[in-house]
Amino acid sequence: MKVYNLCFLGFGNVGRSLAGLLLEKRREMRERYNIEWRITGAASRRMGWLVNVDGFDVESLLAGQSASSISQPPADVRQWLRAARADVLFETTSLEPHTGQPGIEHIRAGLESGAHIVTANKGPIVHAFEELNALAEASERRFMFEATVADCLPIFSMFRECLPMVRVLGFRAVLNSTSSIIIEEMERGHTFEEGVARAQALGVTETDPSYDVDGWDSAVKVCALARVLMRAPLKLEEVEREGIRNLDSKRVQSALAEGRPIKLVARARSLDGRVKASVRPEQVSPDDPLAMTSGTSLMVHFELDVLPGLTIMAHSPDLKSTAYGLLADFINAVNSNRDGQRLSG
């Protein structure tokens, strides 16, 4: 039985949830997939570059009680990956929407060190998908990113495995839980600021929610979907972007009373050989699939050349849902005996 050395770059809420899920599913992974693992590397701004080639005690790692077992801690990501003998790198560092760095360099270093990559970081997909994908193919490693757009929704794997030769003409989506929570609080008569506080209390947004409420998070996800599924090199600045910061409770309540609630809608459509995309608050009709979303739920409605409409939805996903997206990519990466980089068979 192969024992995989796992390295966690970023050990915040998502990384910690993944570590817990790996423990929960350990026996099942061994019995059903013949997979065993140990965490030999963990790194974050707070922790530094930790290495234990024999494997950390996960409970101690989660409790913040672990230290490197080597005398000279690594100075950078490449030294760290070599010292930890990484087979799989989980890259879950924070989004930087405008450049994708340092996530791009992390993933590049992981592939060049011989590790499979599993990431929840959207930036590298938007700014360097083709380069990183080609590097993965050349390295005979997998570059997996299911958790980047809609937590555990199997969007990329669905097209890769189940929909060969299909062409995506466009999509509409609700992709940001924070904005949905804030809008719902405003529907109840609360202020925008109270909505932000509610989202923070639920753990779905950061202390600074700007990327969420100003539409950056959704715009990056639109670019990632367009780049991978539509083969369109859509740039972030090409997405018409309007967040929810200027919404007021009266407008939101009025839209709800009309039966056409406001959602932060992300969309892209292929027109005359180019992709036109936007993120903005929109009223949706009761028969619109997007009207079904509530709370942290996420949804994407695709228009395909062979199917007028295909809708996929995650009902009330949480951190464990995101962690599952990473876990599923890990299993698929190490179990694959073929080139899985192409999305169309």
Image: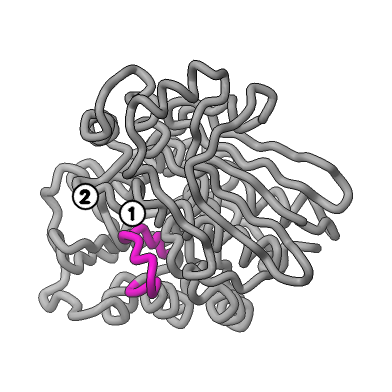
Give the quadrant of residue 91. bottom left
Q: Which residue does the image show at 49% across and 25% down from the upper left?
A: 255
Look at the picture and state if 219 lies above or below 143.
Answer: above
Look at the picture and state if 39 lies above or below 27.
Answer: below
**Residue 253 lies in the magenta stretch:** no
Q: Principal SS element in the magenta part?
A: loop
Horizontal side, residue 227 vs residue 98: left or right: right
Residue 158, percent across and down?
A: 70, 48
Residue 231, percent across and down?
A: 69, 69
Q: Which residue is mark 1?
A: 211
Horizontal side, residue 334 vs residue 272: left or right: left
Q: Which residue does the image show at 19% across and 46% down from the upper left?
A: 207
Residue 151, percent across and down?
A: 48, 44
How crowded pointer 1 is (Cα within 10 Å; few <14, some 14-19, many 20+) is rated as many
- The tally of labels here is 2
Q: Which residue does the image show at 55% across and 33% down from the upper left?
A: 283
From this viewpoint, is residue 1 visible? no
Q: As drawn, which residue projects farthest toward the right?
A: 306
Q: Which residues are magenta?
A: 89-102
Horizontal side, residue 280 vs residue 214: left or right: right
Whether pointer 1 and pointer 2 mark residues with C-beta atoms closer than 8 Å, the reply is yes
Horizontal side, residue 35 vs residue 323: left or right: right
At mark 1, the secondary structure is helix
Amino acid type assigned to the residue bearing label 2 in the image:
Asp
